[in-house]
Amino acid sequence: MNRQLGQKAIIALVILCIAVASIGWYLALSNQTLCGASTEDAMVLLSIGLGLGCVPFIPGTSGALGGVILSLLISRLSITKQLIAVALLILVAIPISENGERFFANKDASVIVADELHTFPLATIGLPVHQHPVMLAGIFMTNRIVDWTKPPPARAAESIPGGVGIVLDDVVVSLWTLLIFTIGWRWYLHSANKKSSVADKP
């Protein structure tokens, strides 16, 4: 039952992301503005997650929702390929975020969500999120809570100027989330194996 609920939640999140991105592309084709930016500027569009950053009140959360889709795709790869894919996403996010910062003339403006979007998959490396949707939902919620609380050294990383600072604090947030769930998953597997061993004894 929990698995079915988790799958429905993920499907709903994916549909939401596609809907918002579709609106962004519609506006782009109509030569309109998005979050006050010209839709002809590809780098600015990428910095706002193709419109995900324009969602009122929760732009960062909306950006992380886009990261859920990336996580589902990347989690099916080998660990090595997951690491390479996440490293590339993080490296690409730095110039994109810096360009957005220059355009909006604001340090880590709320509409800039390339950092949340590109770094969220880091929180799922090595975890079977495509097999356990409830785990992915838990990672998403934990990631947002950790992002709001900014445990060390997230705030210190955030103070670094330019795109590096914008992205690095989200890298720290995702690493904290990954640590929490990796420990939890290992503990769960250990407990399950221990129970199985006890049950197999005559």
Image (cartoon, rainbow, N blue to C red):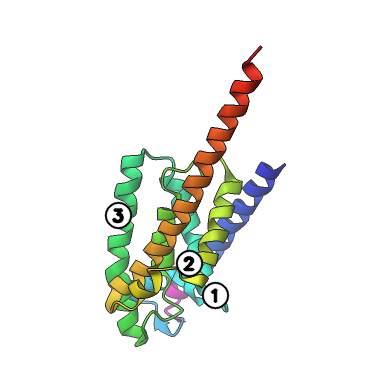
Distance CA(mark 1)–CA(mark 3): 27 Å
Q: Earlier in the sequence, mark 3 or mark 2?
A: 2
Q: Which of marks 2 and 1 is nearer the N terminus?
A: 1
At horizontal 44% and vertical 69% (from top left) the residue drawn is: 50
Task: Please rate how many residues cluster around mark 3, counting C-alpha atoms within 10 Å: few if below 14, some from 14 to 19, many from 20.
Answer: some
The N terminus, quarter of image: top right
Which corner quadrant holds the C terminus? top right
Q: Which of marks 1 and 3 is nearer the N terminus?
A: 1
Q: Do the residues labelled 1 and 3 touch (CB within 8 Å)?
A: no
Q: Where is residue 113 in the image (x, y as percent from the top left)?
A: 43, 71
Residue 200, picture quadrant = top right
Residue 139 lies in the magenta-colored region: no
Amino acid type, callout 1 = Val
Which residue lies under the disc numbered 3?
Answer: 87
The amino acid on which the numbered mark 3 sits, given as a three-letter code, is Ala
Residue occupied by mark 2 = 63
User: Magenta segment, which residues?
Assistant: 24-34
Residue mark closest to the camera, 1 vs 3? 3
Do residues under tags 3 and 2 come within 8 Å of each other at their CB atoms? no
CA gap, disc 3 and disc 2: 18 Å
The answer to which image quadrant residue 167 occupies is: bottom left
Residue 55's disc number: 1
Q: Mark yes or no: residue 90 visible.
A: yes
> In this rendering, would 8 be left or right of 19?
right
Image position, residue 100 (x, y; %): 34, 78
In this view, 180 is above or below 27: above
